[in-house]
Image: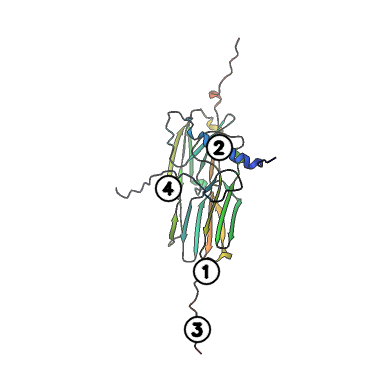
Amino acid sequence: MFRFTSALDTLLALQEAVEAARTSDYFGRSTTSRGTFPSINLFQDGDDTVIMAEVPGVKKEEIQLQIKDNLITISGERKTDYPEKASVHRVERRGFKFNRTMKLPVKVDIEKVKADYENGILKIVMPRAESDKPKMIDIN
Amino acid sequence: MKNEEKKEITVQEKKEVQTKSEPTTPGKVYLPNTDIVETETELLVYMDMPGVGKNKLKVKLEKNVLGIEGEIDSSPYSSLKPLYTEYNIGHFSRSFELSNEIDQSGIKASMDDGVLLLTLPKVPAKQPKMITVN
């Protein structure tokens, strides 16, 4: 029987799932400024909220991350530098300063937020605050 | 409008690779945004390939066509459930035709923060050939 190998199957399934979430109204009516840099993807991993952003060419030291309550701000600068006296054939990449703030619909435990940066992808893992987690109520 | 320092930041939508032949692997493949600049001695190619590790990059040269393929690792996403998305995730692929001016044996590649830099040295300008008259 014909089968895809699992790794490729996963990527295709992932791409379809990501595409399907494009029209989600996760942020509700709060301003998310969709269409500004950097583009973000927001995932759920158990109780954690995970934000990923593609910021290729930005140095780790040039990214600033700020969280206050449920407001998260990503800012920094993307530079596209060439050697002096270079003549330009084709320019598709752009350099600029960026600053983007999002208001999450969940409360985050700020002390436990972790961020790492690898291969141009910023990943922010934000555990949900205990006080924000739903409580099970026993019915007598 | 005056030439202001502040540039408008709009997101560049990722472009999907359009090919005549169908790829053998399922899934979307994207075109990396590319800058090409030329100095006196070399051609520099910068490509945005976020998520591609050094060991997942293939640069091949066949005849005069330089082909670049970058694979992303989808395994970190396996436990993640997308809630809100603005861009899709996929491998990258793009190829360029090189002119004869490039010294194909001296091509170098490096990868930093998701940006690939290819250094293509130019063949030293040929000296005009002197022909002696007998």
**Which residue corresponds to mark 3?**
B131
Asked if marks 2 and 1 fall on the same chain, the answer is: no
Dot 2 alpha-carbon crowd within 10 angstroms: few under 14, some 14 to 19, many 20 or more? some
Callout 4 secondary element: strand
Q: Earlier in the sequence, mark 3 or mark 1?
A: 1
Q: Earlier in the sequence, mark 4 or mark 2?
A: 2
- Under mark 4, the amino acid is Phe
Please tell me whether mark 4 or mark 2 is closer to you in this view: 2
Vertical placement of residue A108 versus B134, above or below: above
Please tell me whether mark 1 or mark 4 is closer to you in this view: 1
Distance of label 2 from label 3 (alpha carbons): 66 Å
Residue A121 on image: x %, y %: 54, 44
Distance of label 3 from label 1 (alpha carbons): 22 Å
Distance of label 3 from label 4 (alpha carbons): 54 Å
**Which residue corresponds to mark 4?**
A96
Vertical placement of residue A19 versus A56, above or below: above
- Under mark 3, the amino acid is Ile
**Residue at 52%, 69% in the rendered image:** B123
Please tell me whether mark 3 or mark 1 is closer to you in this view: 3
Residue A28 in sight here: yes
- Under mark 1, the amino acid is Val
**Which residue corresponds to mark 1?**
B123
Distance of label 4 from label 2 (alpha carbons): 31 Å
Q: How many marks?
A: 4
Dot 1 alpha-carbon crowd within 10 angstroms: few under 14, some 14 to 19, many 20 or more? some
Chain ID at mark 3: B
Dot 3 alpha-carbon crowd within 10 angstroms: few under 14, some 14 to 19, many 20 or more? few
Does A87 sit left or right of B110 as displayed?
Answer: left
How did the renderer colour the structure? rainbow
Name the mark on residue A16: 2
**Residue at 44%, 59% in the rendered image:** A89
